[in-house]
Image: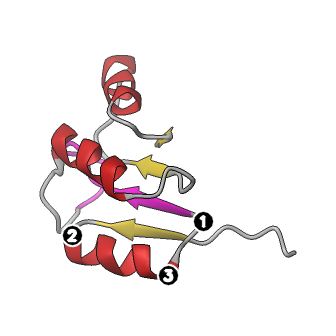
Amino acid sequence: EHNLAFGISTHSYAELSVALGVKPSYISLGPVFGTTSKNVAFDPQGLHTVQKWRELIDPDVPLVVIGGINDADRAKQMKDAGADCVG
């Protein structure tokens, strides 16, 4: 046991499919909302995608969501949608 976490970032169904195939420690999704903290090449995923990812990912695999979650209301929405960690 090396106590390492192996996470995979996803931005599309294709990337999620690959992530599910390698069974990572966690899967991240982002950006959920538009963000100005950095330039990203992906459109905002939205709340519906968070809910869909949670349905598709094994409940034992944490779902981490990032991007534009800049207040407590948005963070609560993410947790209510099934995210395990909000970044």
Magenta stretch: give its range.
26-39
The residue that appears at 85% across and 75% down in the rendered structure is: 2
Residue 5, image x and y in percent?
67, 67
- Distance from Cα at disc 2 to Cα at disc 1: 18 Å
Q: Amino acid at mark 3?
A: Val
Q: Give the left or right position of residue 14, taking residue 3 as reference.
A: left
Q: Which residue is mark 1?
A: 25
Judge whether 48 appears above or below 73 on screen. below
Q: Is residue 27 magenta?
A: yes
How busy is the neighbourhood of tag 1: few (under 14 within 10 Å), some, or many (20 plus)? some
Q: Is residue 74 magenta?
A: no
Pointer 3 with pointer 2, Cβ within 8 A: no
- Distance from Cα at disc 3 to Cα at disc 2: 15 Å
Q: Which residue is mark 2?
A: 13
Closest to the observer, 42 or 26: 26
How busy is the neighbourhood of tag 2: few (under 14 within 10 Å), some, or many (20 plus)? few
Q: Amino acid at mark 1?
A: Ser
Q: Amino acid at mark 2?
A: Tyr
- Residue at the left extreme of this rendering: 43
Q: Secondary structure at mark 1?
A: loop
Q: Which residue is mark 3?
A: 22
Residue 26, image x and y in percent?
54, 61
Residue 30, image x and y in percent?
30, 55
Residue 3, image x and y in percent?
81, 67
